[in-house]
Image (cartoon, rainbow, N blue to C red):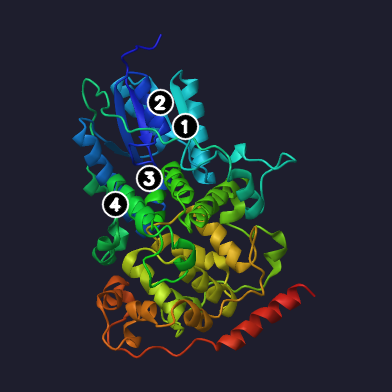
Amino acid sequence: MTDPDAPLILWFRRDLRLADHPMLTAARSTGRPLIPLFILDPETEAIGAAPKWRWGLSIADFAARLGAMGSRLTLRRGRALEVLQSLAAETGAAGVMWSRAYDPVSKARDTAVKSALRQRGALAESHPGFVLHEPWTVETGQGGFYRVYTPYWKAVKDRPVPPALPAPDRLPAPQSWPRSDLLDDWAMGAAMRRGAPICLPYQAVGEAAAMARLERFIASRADAYKAERDFPDREATSRLSENLTYGEISPRQIWHAGFRAMQQGAAGAEHFLKELVWREFAWHLMHHTPEIATSNWREEWNAFPWRDDNPQAEAWRRGMTGEPFVDAAMREMYVTGTMHNRARMIAASYLTKHLMTHWKVGLDWFADCLTDWDPAANAMGWQWVAGSGPDAAPYFRIFNPAGQADRFDPDRRYIHRFVAELARLPGGAARAYFNAVPRSWGLAEGRPYPTPLIALEAGRERALAAYAERNA
């Protein structure tokens, strides 16, 4: 029989917080000593430069929070199962607990880990992860999964959401702590190179920063959220996508705060909750149709004549298309690590429609450059804009970057903030772009702004002609 004093290993991943943590609450209730662990496994090693760097910042903050309450975060590098088995042997651990993930790569890894540990007689227990509702618990009247957002929203908007769980006041420590790698030795920010110090001031790292963001949004921005969220020059959004990505805050905490604001009359609070559920819907789809991240969700789009990577796509990547709104969006990403949602739609539409480039080219670039990279939201967003995905925008809806700027950036404050060549007196963010991008691009202040890659109307007509031919 398992020693009742044998410790449990708590395998942390995208859940780097103490409050509202089902796995941590369950582990604490056992009374056993607890060994928090983060594994730099091949699955984590494979993510893009910006999210990997940002994840490292979150790990450091979480380790400090654990240390402040008398616990420690053990760091190990290697294949997850091998690390867990080795650590269990070293510490005499009774088993492992973790929070679920829903992308296909993580699910395959976790399934194999759970099976192997249980075959050895160890406890292997997964707990609810970074969603409001487990994907398999939300079904249509016919018993299948939802393929369209609006019915999904109607199905969950009145569904009870359990209250957020309190943070533990302490975690029982083992008799001795196992060896730990040094986080600096992992060099999780190496691929960011000179971009890291440019992006760093724009990050709000850790659980305390996430909660402060939420409280600030509810107090000062929730009321005007629906009316102002599409204007990228305004501080109108919560910016919590960064914190949700690493589990520094839970969707339940956000839901309850937004719901209270809605009950108290905040005009934009319900729309804010709808955006939270849009993320939820993305994970619902990724669980049920994992191919959404790698291939056209609608198979009829497989024959569409999108181009593979090309020189115009490279100009798009560099923020040098000659279309100010598109270039501002791309440069915002290099300077801050994130991109306003309206700007994401415009940049994605320009690449997939005006430049006729496959959405996968853009999806992969965002996955490398966004510090708030979310594999499900990224995949659904790109396919929505491209027209090939679930609940997609009609292909003939082609965002005109100039018209969008007139509507959502009429004074060009957003464009001038990030495109130095177009500003009379470029500010720090616009100039920082040249220090954030790779030196190999050869970009420097003072060069003339590029001419447009393609006339907007010509690009639109080309895209519509390809769409018409595909449907002929």
Taking the image as shown, residue 434 lies to the left or right of residue 103, namely left
Tag 3 secondary structure = loop
Query: Going by the image, does 18 lie left or right of 294?
Result: left
Q: Position of residue 271 (x, y in %)?
A: 52, 57
Three-letter amino acid code of the residue under disc 1:
His
Residue that badge 3 annotates = 249
Q: From mark 3 to mark 4, how far is it between C-alphas? A: 11 Å
Q: Earlier in the sequence, mark 3 or mark 1?
A: 1
Category of crowding for the residue at label 2, using alpha-carbon neighbours closer than 10 angstroms: few (below 14), some (14–19), many (at least 20): few
Residue 26 - label: 2
Q: Is residue 463 above or below residue 276?
A: below
Residue that badge 4 annotates: 205
Disc on the earlier residue, 4 or 2: 2
Question: Residue 367: x, y in percent?
Answer: 44, 60
Do residues under tags 1 and 2 come within 8 Å of each other at their CB atoms? Answer: yes
Q: Residue at x 41, y 31 (%)?
A: 23
Instruction: Give the quadrant of the C terminus.
Output: bottom right
Q: Is residue 333 left or right of residue 138?
A: left
Q: Nearer the viewer, mark 3 or mark 1?
A: 3
> Which element carries disc 2, helix, strand or loop?
helix
- Separation of marks 3 and 1 at Cα, in angstroms: 16 Å
What residue sits 35% from the left and 45% below the top? Answer: 248
Q: Residue 233 appears in which quarter of the rendering?
A: bottom left
- Circle 4: residue type: Val
